Amino acid sequence: MLLSLLLFTYACSTKQPVQQGATMESTSQDSVAAKPEPSDLPETESLPSTSTEVEVSSETADKPSPIEPWGKPDTILAKILTEGFFHSDEVWEDAQTEKWYGLFQNKNGFYLQQTNLETERYYDPIIDEDESEKTGWKVSTSNQDTSVVLISSTDLIKSRKVEAVTLSKQEIWPGNKVTFTYKGNPYTLQATGKKKRSDAGSDYYIVSNYKLFLSTIKNGQEVKQLLVESRFFDDAMIYIRFVGDLDGDSFPDFLIDRSNDYNGSNPSLFLSTPAKNGSLLKMVGTHESVGC
């Protein structure tokens, strides 16, 4: 029982995704650390660039629906999972019978490949009274390479090598931007919102009214789309897990953890192929889970 508790506690505390492969150019501007030393930055009142919020018109921003970070896509086009340990209601009974593709990483880079999903009931020390109950789930695959995300129920994903983007940072705080080039086209990720120190001299910041935008030139015109927004955070930040062409249309797709809570995980898949005119991406699937 003690071993099971330790394993589950470890799984709850180690949900960090793998780092992306260095295959594409990426640069950043106006860098702000998540937990900077007090000497690194002036006090909040002297940080106008990190506390301003930029409004984007409806003609240039395609809001995800719904807006809250724990919401689901307006139309579910894919199911996604990750390997690990989950509570009873976070994995469905017949998941292993579906056709799954995994995004994997090995020493040669990233690739998509059909895989066998393996699920088994597991003792959940947070919920179960004793080891005989086993209401939790353990999710794994038959592939031994590092798993980034598992995708089912969509015809947009095929087995292929994936050219990935290495972002200069995967958490983009208000006032920051990250630029990268993919297939010869420049892209910019930019965050707006309000950011202030939790108290004088603190290394921690309070972020509110957060918005993350993606912009590029498409068909000769600039397109700027709102990807994620959150009104508040609890010791967490939006985290970009992966950028690369997953659906084979030569445009970058995104896997973004939209959780605004330190105790939760909400990886969400954004694909370019199903995006409507005037948009760059569409959120097609998401998976919500909580830790301990």
Image (spheres, rainbow, N blue to C red):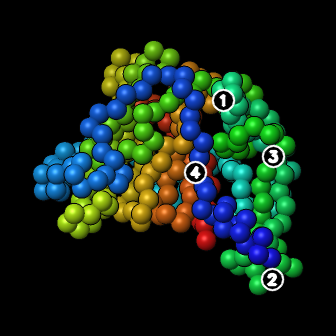
**What residue sits right under mark 3 in the picture?**
141
Looking at the rendered structure, the kind of residue marked 1 is: Phe
Marks 1 and 3, how far apart at CA: 16 Å
Marks 2 and 1, how far apart at CA: 40 Å
Mark 1 nearby-residue class (10 Å; few <14, some 14–19, many ≥20): many
Marks 2 and 3, how far apart at CA: 27 Å
Residue lying at the far left of the rendered structure: 46
- SS category of the residue bearing label 2: loop
Q: Quadrant of the N terminus?
A: bottom right
Q: Which mark is residue 130?
A: 2
Q: Residue 253 placed where, x, y %?
A: 54, 33
Left or right? Give the position of 247 relative to 33: right
Instruction: Of the two numbered discs 2 and 1 on the same chain, state the one appearing first in sequence.
Output: 1
- SS category of the residue bearing label 3: strand
Looking at the rendered structure, the kind of residue marked 2 is: Asp
**What residue sits right under mark 4 in the picture?**
16
Instruction: Of the two numbered discs 2 and 4 on the same chain, state the one appearing first in sequence.
Output: 4
Looking at the rendered structure, the kind of residue marked 4 is: Gln
